Image (cartoon, rainbow, N blue to C red):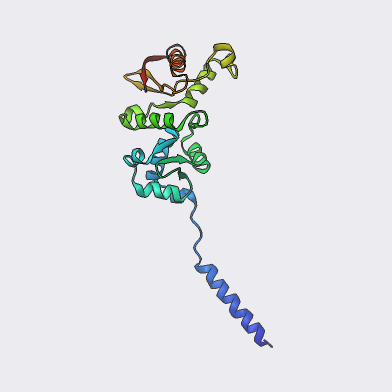
Amino acid sequence: MMGPFDAIANEVTLKNSDLEINKEKPKKLKDVLKDSHYKTLHHFTKIGIASITSISSFSSKKIIKELIKLEILSNLDCKRIVLTDKGKNICKSKFKPISMPSRSKQSIQQILMRSELYFTLPEEVRQTWEDQNQLIRLFYDEYPEYKDKIIEKLGFTTWIDARIKINDKYIGICIKPKSNGHKMLEQKKRIAYEYMNCHDIYEL
Protein backbone atom coordinates (compact mmCIF):
# COMPACT_ATOMS: atom_id res chain seq x y z
CA MET A 1 0.00 0.00 0.00
CA MET A 2 1.41 3.42 -1.01
CA GLY A 3 1.69 6.01 1.73
CA PRO A 4 1.40 9.79 1.33
CA PHE A 5 5.19 10.27 1.34
CA ASP A 6 5.60 7.67 -1.42
CA ALA A 7 3.19 9.58 -3.62
CA ILE A 8 5.12 12.81 -3.08
CA ALA A 9 8.40 11.04 -3.85
CA ASN A 10 6.99 9.65 -7.10
CA GLU A 11 5.71 13.09 -8.05
CA VAL A 12 9.13 14.65 -7.45
CA THR A 13 10.80 11.87 -9.42
CA LEU A 14 8.50 12.47 -12.36
CA LYS A 15 9.15 16.19 -12.28
CA ASN A 16 12.91 15.66 -12.15
CA SER A 17 12.61 13.20 -15.01
CA ASP A 18 10.69 15.72 -17.06
CA LEU A 19 13.41 18.28 -16.46
CA GLU A 20 16.10 15.87 -17.62
CA ILE A 21 14.18 15.11 -20.80
CA ASN A 22 13.67 18.77 -21.64
CA LYS A 23 17.15 19.87 -20.68
CA GLU A 24 19.30 20.70 -23.72
CA LYS A 25 22.76 19.22 -23.86
CA PRO A 26 25.51 21.85 -24.13
CA LYS A 27 26.86 22.16 -27.67
CA LYS A 28 30.38 20.99 -28.36
CA LEU A 29 32.82 23.71 -29.34
CA LYS A 30 33.38 22.18 -32.76
CA ASP A 31 29.64 22.49 -33.42
CA VAL A 32 29.63 26.15 -32.37
CA LEU A 33 32.63 27.34 -34.39
CA LYS A 34 31.94 28.06 -38.05
CA ASP A 35 34.14 28.89 -41.02
CA SER A 36 33.84 32.60 -40.22
CA HIS A 37 35.25 31.97 -36.73
CA TYR A 38 38.15 29.92 -38.05
CA LYS A 39 38.92 32.51 -40.72
CA THR A 40 39.34 35.11 -37.98
CA LEU A 41 41.44 32.79 -35.83
CA HIS A 42 43.75 31.99 -38.74
CA HIS A 43 45.01 35.58 -38.72
CA PHE A 44 46.10 35.13 -35.10
CA THR A 45 48.24 32.10 -35.97
CA LYS A 46 50.26 34.55 -38.07
CA ILE A 47 50.47 37.60 -35.80
CA GLY A 48 49.39 36.57 -32.26
CA ILE A 49 47.90 39.97 -31.41
CA ALA A 50 45.89 42.61 -33.27
CA SER A 51 44.30 45.95 -32.63
CA ILE A 52 40.52 45.93 -32.63
CA THR A 53 40.57 48.39 -35.52
CA SER A 54 42.71 46.11 -37.70
CA ILE A 55 40.95 42.82 -37.04
CA SER A 56 37.53 44.48 -37.39
CA SER A 57 38.37 45.31 -40.98
CA PHE A 58 38.68 41.57 -41.68
CA SER A 59 36.07 40.14 -39.33
CA SER A 60 32.67 41.25 -38.04
CA LYS A 61 32.35 42.53 -34.49
CA LYS A 62 29.77 39.79 -33.91
CA ILE A 63 32.34 37.07 -34.64
CA ILE A 64 34.96 38.73 -32.44
CA LYS A 65 32.49 39.09 -29.55
CA GLU A 66 31.48 35.43 -29.88
CA LEU A 67 35.12 34.30 -29.75
CA ILE A 68 35.73 36.46 -26.69
CA LYS A 69 32.61 35.04 -25.01
CA LEU A 70 33.86 31.52 -25.73
CA GLU A 71 37.21 32.55 -24.13
CA ILE A 72 39.07 31.79 -27.35
CA LEU A 73 40.11 35.42 -27.77
CA SER A 74 40.77 37.93 -25.02
CA ASN A 75 40.34 41.70 -25.04
CA LEU A 76 43.47 43.05 -23.35
CA ASP A 77 42.51 46.67 -22.83
CA CYS A 78 39.57 47.42 -25.13
CA LYS A 79 42.12 48.09 -27.87
CA ARG A 80 44.01 44.85 -28.46
CA ILE A 81 42.84 41.28 -29.05
CA VAL A 82 44.97 38.18 -28.34
CA LEU A 83 44.56 34.43 -28.42
CA THR A 84 43.95 32.78 -25.05
CA ASP A 85 45.62 29.48 -24.20
CA LYS A 86 42.36 27.81 -25.18
CA GLY A 87 42.46 29.66 -28.49
CA LYS A 88 46.07 28.62 -29.12
CA ASN A 89 45.17 24.96 -28.58
CA ILE A 90 42.26 25.24 -31.03
CA CYS A 91 44.49 26.88 -33.64
CA LYS A 92 47.21 24.26 -33.20
CA SER A 93 44.63 21.51 -33.73
CA LYS A 94 42.87 23.17 -36.66
CA PHE A 95 45.72 24.78 -38.60
CA LYS A 96 48.76 22.82 -37.37
CA PRO A 97 51.17 25.77 -37.62
CA ILE A 98 54.91 25.21 -37.25
CA SER A 99 54.71 27.37 -34.14
CA MET A 100 52.55 30.06 -32.58
CA PRO A 101 53.62 33.72 -32.42
CA SER A 102 55.07 34.72 -29.07
CA ARG A 103 55.05 38.13 -27.44
CA SER A 104 57.12 37.30 -24.36
CA LYS A 105 60.39 38.82 -25.65
CA GLN A 106 58.97 41.66 -27.69
CA SER A 107 57.28 44.89 -26.73
CA ILE A 108 53.58 45.23 -27.42
CA GLN A 109 54.38 48.21 -29.63
CA GLN A 110 56.67 46.11 -31.83
CA ILE A 111 54.08 43.36 -32.14
CA LEU A 112 51.35 45.82 -33.06
CA MET A 113 53.59 47.42 -35.68
CA ARG A 114 54.11 43.99 -37.18
CA SER A 115 50.41 43.11 -37.12
CA GLU A 116 49.41 46.47 -38.62
CA LEU A 117 51.74 45.76 -41.53
CA TYR A 118 50.29 42.26 -41.91
CA PHE A 119 46.77 43.63 -42.37
CA THR A 120 47.88 46.09 -45.06
CA LEU A 121 49.24 43.32 -47.29
CA PRO A 122 47.31 41.73 -50.16
CA GLU A 123 45.74 38.36 -49.36
CA GLU A 124 48.22 36.39 -51.49
CA VAL A 125 51.14 37.98 -49.63
CA ARG A 126 49.55 37.46 -46.19
CA GLN A 127 49.37 33.77 -47.02
CA THR A 128 53.18 33.67 -47.22
CA TRP A 129 53.68 35.42 -43.85
CA GLU A 130 56.08 33.62 -41.50
CA ASP A 131 56.48 34.91 -37.96
CA GLN A 132 59.63 35.08 -35.88
CA ASN A 133 59.11 31.77 -34.07
CA GLN A 134 58.56 29.94 -37.37
CA LEU A 135 61.75 31.41 -38.82
CA ILE A 136 63.83 30.44 -35.78
CA ARG A 137 62.56 26.87 -36.06
CA LEU A 138 63.32 26.79 -39.77
CA PHE A 139 66.83 28.04 -39.00
CA TYR A 140 67.41 25.29 -36.43
CA ASP A 141 66.11 22.68 -38.88
CA GLU A 142 68.71 23.80 -41.41
CA TYR A 143 71.49 24.48 -38.89
CA PRO A 144 70.99 22.02 -36.00
CA GLU A 145 74.57 22.63 -34.84
CA TYR A 146 73.46 26.06 -33.57
CA LYS A 147 70.59 24.72 -31.47
CA ASP A 148 70.57 26.61 -28.15
CA LYS A 149 73.99 28.08 -29.03
CA ILE A 150 72.99 30.84 -31.41
CA ILE A 151 74.26 33.62 -29.13
CA GLU A 152 77.48 31.81 -28.24
CA LYS A 153 78.39 30.80 -31.83
CA LEU A 154 76.92 33.58 -33.96
CA GLY A 155 76.52 36.41 -31.48
CA PHE A 156 72.87 36.99 -32.36
CA THR A 157 70.67 38.38 -29.58
CA THR A 158 67.70 39.12 -31.82
CA TRP A 159 65.97 37.79 -34.94
CA ILE A 160 64.06 39.14 -37.91
CA ASP A 161 60.42 39.83 -37.08
CA ALA A 162 58.77 38.13 -40.05
CA ARG A 163 59.25 37.09 -43.65
CA ILE A 164 56.99 37.34 -46.68
CA LYS A 165 57.30 36.30 -50.30
CA ILE A 166 56.57 38.57 -53.26
CA ASN A 167 57.16 37.42 -56.85
CA ASP A 168 58.97 34.33 -55.53
CA LYS A 169 61.45 36.46 -53.59
CA TYR A 170 61.66 36.59 -49.79
CA ILE A 171 61.40 39.94 -48.04
CA GLY A 172 62.57 40.22 -44.43
CA ILE A 173 60.48 42.32 -42.03
CA CYS A 174 62.72 44.11 -39.54
CA ILE A 175 61.49 46.38 -36.75
CA LYS A 176 64.07 48.72 -35.26
CA PRO A 177 63.92 48.42 -31.44
CA LYS A 178 64.02 51.56 -29.31
CA SER A 179 66.77 50.14 -27.11
CA ASN A 180 70.11 49.65 -28.87
CA GLY A 181 68.18 49.97 -32.10
CA HIS A 182 70.97 50.40 -34.68
CA LYS A 183 72.93 47.37 -33.46
CA MET A 184 69.82 45.17 -33.30
CA LEU A 185 68.70 46.26 -36.74
CA GLU A 186 72.08 45.41 -38.25
CA GLN A 187 71.87 41.94 -36.67
CA LYS A 188 68.42 41.44 -38.15
CA LYS A 189 69.64 42.48 -41.60
CA ARG A 190 72.55 40.05 -41.43
CA ILE A 191 70.21 37.23 -40.40
CA ALA A 192 67.78 38.07 -43.19
CA TYR A 193 70.41 38.10 -45.94
CA GLU A 194 72.77 35.37 -44.74
CA TYR A 195 70.44 32.82 -43.15
CA MET A 196 66.85 33.54 -44.23
CA ASN A 197 67.43 33.78 -47.99
CA CYS A 198 65.93 37.28 -48.13
CA HIS A 199 66.30 39.27 -51.33
CA ASP A 200 65.37 42.54 -49.66
CA ILE A 201 64.51 44.11 -46.29
CA TYR A 202 61.43 46.07 -45.23
CA GLU A 203 62.23 48.24 -42.19
CA LEU A 204 59.69 49.47 -39.65
Q: Nearer the viewer, residue 110 or 167?
A: 110
For the N terminus, the image quarter is: bottom right
Q: Nearer the viewer, residue 11 or 67?
A: 67
For the C terminus, the image quarter is: top left
User: Which residue is depicted at the point 53% across and 41% down?
Assistant: 85
In the rendered view, would you say 162 is above or below 73? Answer: above
In the rendered view, would you say 188 is above or below 26? Answer: above
Identity of the residue furthest to the right in this view: 1
With 43 as the anchor, is 28 left or right in this view? right
Q: Nearer the viewer, residue 103 or 195?
A: 103
User: Which residue is depicted at the point 56% across and 72% down?
Assistant: 17
Give the percent coordinates (x, y) of residue 176.
Answer: 41, 21
Q: Nearer the viewer, residue 169 or 18?
A: 169
Give the percent coordinates (x, y) of residue 64.
Answer: 39, 46
Give the percent coordinates (x, y) of residue 149.
Answer: 59, 16
Give the percent coordinates (x, y) of residue 163.
Answer: 41, 22
With 16 as the anchor, is 117 left or right in this view? left
Q: Quadrant of residue 145?
A: top right
In the rendered view, would you say 19 is above or below 193? Answer: below
